[in-house]
Amino acid sequence: MNLSLRRTLLLFAALTALVFLVAACGSAEPPAPAAAPTAEMVATEPPAAEMAATEEPAAEMSGSVANPEYLALLEAAKQEGTLTVSGPNFDPDDVDNLEAGFLEKFGFPVKIISDPGHVRELPARLKAGGKYDVIDGSGITAGQVEEIVGLEPVDWSIFPEEEFPGLQENYAARSRPGINCVLFFRFTWAFVYNTDMLSEDELPRNMEDLTDPKWKGRFAVSDLAVPLGTMSLQWDEEEGMEKMVDLARRLKANGPVIASGGSPGAIAKVVAGEVPIATAAFSSALGLIDQGAPIALLPFRDPEVGSDTAYQPGLSMNVCPVKDSANPNMAKLFTAWMSTGLPPEVSANRGYFRPFREGDTSFIAGFYREHGIGIDQFLTHTDVAKEGQRKNVYGAAAEIYAGLAK
């Protein structure tokens, strides 16, 4: 091939390559800009707050962030979602308020099944096969439950103090050492009277006054005689037994109506107008007052014979998770919450002292303060010996009421 032809072919090849290169570069269009959002697109886009709400809530409790045991319990309780409780006798409004308060507190719901039976019947129901996650009762009742089915051990230290204030103190204040429970509330007995039949200035000032002949046949007492057992705690057992049994005899001699069914039974006699006054648990009267029953409350304002202080007979109640229950994690969580953060609508309705310490702002605490009665005037116990004294004394008094002893 001559030199002229070779140059021609090389020039042709170079020109051809250049054409293909230009064509290739020119065909690559730049990417289209993103379309501007239309009104329709904006309307269908979920707002940021709604998107955030679908995510798992962040742990807000500083203690729980570093507490994997508590977070694990929360998640397990959420999966269980149900709780059966016996002892507090929660009415339907209480249950509604409890469920609403629980949801607000923890961010997930619980279905509460409340056994309406009286707490003293709980041991028999358990022996008959009753199944519960949480029970409420005195140290005596809790001890009976421990013997029948057991109470679940709990490490209360996993619950953040800022979310469950006073829980450790409530554990220490349970009414019997050795039970796997925490203090739930303390309540007291008082005079419950029919406002259509008596005015406040006509009322007796202590239980001793009911032995006056003017009250003969005009008052009711519970067949359980529990307040006499508690009032005995201001003395040792021998002296307390002597004084309260003597009072029981003199009350019995004045012809009271002996009401079965505990305080609710005695209060029913007052509401019906069968008698104008009864001694009964403060907590048993509040719900009826809210419903418009013609009754009111007044504390024991004078000391009983042999005492120099107007003591109020109180009782500590404990809340306890039942061993091997169907919902063990919910039971532990609910127990801690009941002990420290029960909705005020429930505690006010039930007449609970919560937490029954200086600075308590509950309705019942305010009521007693209005009548000049301080928190140091409430008789309760936190040891087995005093618990035994209370039981022995009210048992002896109950026999006198029933006519089984003199």
Image (cartoon, rainbow, N blue to C red):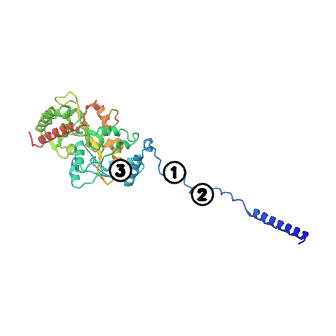
Quadrant housing the N terminus: bottom right
In the image shown, does 296 or 105 lie closer to the viewer?
105
Label annotation for residue 52: 1
Label 2 vs label 1, nearer the camera: 1
Q: Give the amino acid at mark 1.
A: Ala
Residue at the image position 80 percent from the left and 66 percent from the top: 17
Q: Secondary structure at mark 2?
A: helix
In the image shown, does 29 or 88 lie closer to the viewer?
29
Q: Give the amino acid at mark 3.
A: Met
Q: Quadrant of residue 179?
A: top left
Q: Residue furthest bottom?
A: 1
Q: Is residue 3 visible?
A: yes
Q: Position of residue 50 (x, y in %)?
A: 51, 52
Q: Are marks 2 and 1 in contact (CB under 8 Å)?
A: no
Number of marks in the image? 3
Classify mark 3: residues with Cα within 10 Å, few (<14), some (14-19) or many (20+): many
Q: Position of residue 269 (x, y in %)?
A: 19, 44
Q: Residue furthest left?
A: 406
Q: Earlier in the sequence, mark 1 or mark 3?
A: 1
